[in-house]
Image (cartoon, rainbow, N blue to C red):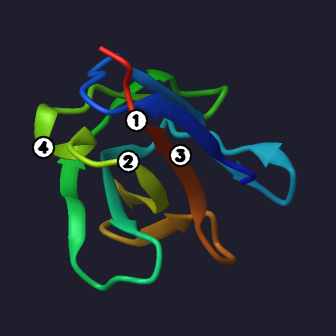
Amino acid sequence: MSLTLKTKVGDTSTWTMTLKEDGSAKNLTAASTVKIYTRKYGETALTTDGRSCVVSNATAGTVVYTPVSADVLVSGIFEVEVKVTWNDASVSKFPSDGFGRLEIDAALG
């Protein structure tokens, strides 16, 4: 999954993500939960700790997350990981190599 999200400080608009495996959208029909994790680049503390995403199109691998104000308090570059727990209790993490990228820019007003 090549994932780059861009937003601004204080913007709680929905983030839409397509989860991919080997370049193709991952079918999420058998997903029981999808959660998002973020942390500021170079730090260990999570800024978004396992908040729930909504599967908006299971066969296309599309999930959405609506951030809360605490997710977008400060500007910077953040790492993103999405954890899918399947109906059989197995777990997959996206992307499977490295992390996605979240860029939060300062707001002007």
Question: Which quadrant of the rendered structure holds the N terminus?
Answer: bottom right
For the residue marked with disc 3, what is the amino acid? Glu
Query: Badge 2: how crowded within 10 Å, few (<14), some, or many (20+)?
Result: some
Q: Which of 96 and 13 is in front in this view?
A: 13
Q: State the separation of the CA atoms marked 3 and 4.
A: 15 Å
Secondary structure found at label 1 = loop
Please provide percent x and percent y for residue 28: 52, 40
**Which badge, 2 or 4, comes first in the chain's sequence?**
4
- Please rate how many residues cluster around mark 4, counting C-alpha atoms within 10 Å: few if below 14, some from 14 to 19, many from 20: few
Q: Which amino acid does label 1 sit on?
A: Ala
> N-terminal of the two: label 3 or label 4?
4
Within 10 Å of the Cα at label 3, are there few (<14), some (14-19), or many (20+) other Cα atoms? Answer: some
Say which mark, if any, is on residue 75: 2
Q: Which amino acid does label 2 sit on?
A: Ser
Q: Residue 70 carries which label?
A: 4
Question: How many tags in the picture?
Answer: 4
Q: Which of marks 1 and 4 is in front?
A: 1
Number of the label disc, if any, that sits on residue 106: 1
Foreground: disc 3 or disc 2: 2
Whether residue 62 appears in this view of the structure is: no
Residue at 15% x, 32% y: name it: 68
Mark 3, residue position: 103
